[in-house]
Amino acid sequence: QVQLQESGPGLVKPSETLSLTCTVSGASVSSRNLYWSWIRQPPGKGLEWIGNIFYSGTTSYNPSLKSRVTMSIETSKNGFSLKLNSVTAADTAVYYCARVPVVAVVYGSFFDYWGQGSLVTVSS
Amino acid sequence: DLQMTQSPSSLSASVGDRVTITCRASQSIRTYLNWYQQKPGKAPRLLIFASSSLQSGVPSRFSGSGSGTDFTLTISGLQPEDFAAYYCLQTYNIPWTFGQGTRVEIK
């Protein structure tokens, strides 16, 4: 079955770069039928979409984060990564990776599989 | 950004109740609306996509409706495992945006 697993440091210092990897099993990040996404959730708060990446490397980012975000496909690891630079305490959150299947246009887009989440705390 | 307003922000209900949660978009999003359930400490789970399509494996007591700007998630016959937070998500425009969530609590 499809599984996604986030990994990376749980503590990042202010002004530094947050780096996370999502390792995928049961599906290929090289598939033309899938997008891959990052979503975050500050403790006790709601969900925020960060961005998507396609197997080709094509990305879509949330404009509120676009200047600080880089997403990449890591084919050799069957995964994808997130880098968020110049972090502040406001970036403290649980970071989720998720899968978006390419379906008929009428169905739009949706996250059908999620990782368990990785808490990243920004603190000195 | 396209704003998604969910109501209520929380509700108390009993097992067996019919529960309705609404989500209003600040502009038309056609039917590009999803619903997710999230339990404490867990990742969200897809319930409904394209406003009314039930995700595989989701119980039929969950249903969704709406188009344009107004959408509804209905739980017909609340079960103990349904006490959780629920979020809507629009994928019509970038940035994709979630509603602020509705917490369903035990009365």
Image (spheres, coloured by chain):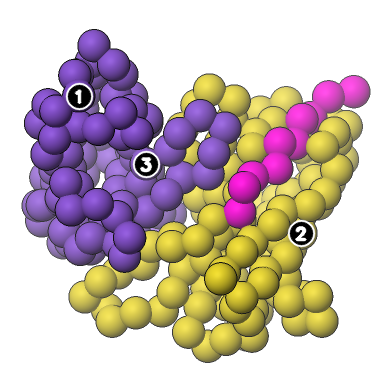
Q: Is residue B84 above or below residue A75?
A: above
Q: Residue at image x 43%, y 54%?
A: B95
Q: Is residue A31 above or below residue A13?
A: below
**Mark-to-mark CA distance, 2 and 3:** 24 Å
Residue at mark 1: B15
Which chain does the yellow colour mark? A
**Residue B60: within the magenta?**
no
Chain letter for mark 1: B
Marking on residue A21: 2
Name which residue type carries label 2: Thr
Residue A28's spot in the image, x, y percent? 63, 81
Give the color of chain B as drawn: purple
Q: Is residue B96 left or right of residue B24?
A: right
Residue B103 in which image quadrant: top left
Span highlighted in magenta in the image: A115-124
Local SS, label 1: loop
Q: Is residue A14 left or right of residue A66?
A: right
**Mark-to-mark CA distance, 1 and 3:** 17 Å
- The front one of A105 and B63 is B63
